[in-house]
Image: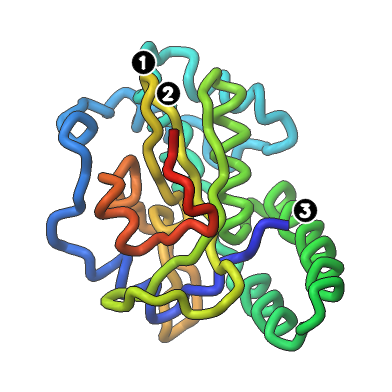
Amino acid sequence: MRSLCAKIALTWVAILFCSTGVNGQIDEFNSMDFSKADSMATLYPDHSLQDLRLLATKLTRPLSTEEEKFRAIYKWICNNIAYDYDIYRRNKREREKLVHPDALKIWNNKISTVVFRTLLNEHKTVCTGYAYLVKELAYHAGLSCRIVDGFGLVAKDNRPLSKLPNHTWNEIRLNGEWYPCDATWSSGAMNTTTWQYVRKYNNRYFLQDRAEFEKRHVRTDSAPAQ
């Protein structure tokens, strides 16, 4: 299983809610009119995930460009999928106890089942679920998208917090170029007083400039996107 997010709570809140400076958005995307795509993303709240092809078609059929189609998919996911902090804590607790690679593999397979069942049934997940849904909906919309494993870094810290990958995100190919994005970090954050998930869209990690994106994301695969 692709590794689960091991960074949330205060760190996530700081990154998501206190990032008020320049977002490092690529100019060509920052200046685009995504109003139609954003409108499409609001039309199907809590739509079933049992038929992803149907959902992708509904979201993108009226849109003409790759950028608009991906925007509608991305915004729909961020607006409709909540972060499951209970799964995060359970996974973090178990992974910290496991040393042998075989035991870790068994646990990863077990928690994967929980992650994707919860995603389908409750519209809640962790970073692996977000990345999976982005990839699958993009695929059904005729877009090339891939999942990337690596480390999500704490603000002002350039070192991974553990030896095990702790985060998962996506790269989407638009008009022949690959761009990074992170639906988990765009979708919201935990309120560290109530420990309730607060949905609040953050555009910072939507098609962000790669150099800016990689200040907080380190790939386990060091090969650059082609």
For label 2, the residue is 69
Q: CA distance from mark 3 to mark 1?
A: 32 Å
Labels 3 and 1 touching (C-beta < 8 A): no
Could you classify mark 3 by the number of other residues whose Cα lies within 10 Å: few (under 14), some (14-19), or many (20 or more)?
some
Q: Is residue 76 above or below residue 60?
A: below
Labels 1 and 2 touching (C-beta < 8 A): yes
Q: Quadrant of residue 147?
A: top right
Q: Quadrant of residue 33?
A: top left
Dot label at residue 117: 3
The secondary structure type at the circle numbered 2 is helix
Could you classify mark 2 by the number of other residues whose Cα lies within 10 Å: few (under 14), some (14-19), or many (20 or more)?
many
Q: Quadrant of residue 98?
A: bottom right
166 lies left or right of 86: left
Kind of residue at badge 2: Lys
Q: Residue at x 34, y 32 (%)?
A: 38
Q: Is residue 135 above or below residue 113?
A: above
The secondary structure type at the circle numbered 1 is loop
Kind of residue at badge 1: Thr
Residue 35 pos. (x, y %): 27, 28
49 lies left or right of 199: right
Labels 3 and 2 touching (C-beta < 8 A): no
Residue 16 pos. (x, y %): 32, 65
Q: Residue at x 48, y 47 (%)?
A: 223
Q: Residue at x 55, y 62 (%)?
A: 83
Name which of mark 3 and mark 1 comes first in the sequence. Answer: 1
Residue 27 pos. (x, y %): 16, 35
For label 1, the residue is 65
The secondary structure type at the circle numbered 3 is helix
Could you classify mark 1 by the number of other residues whose Cα lies within 10 Å: few (under 14), some (14-19), or many (20 or more)?
few
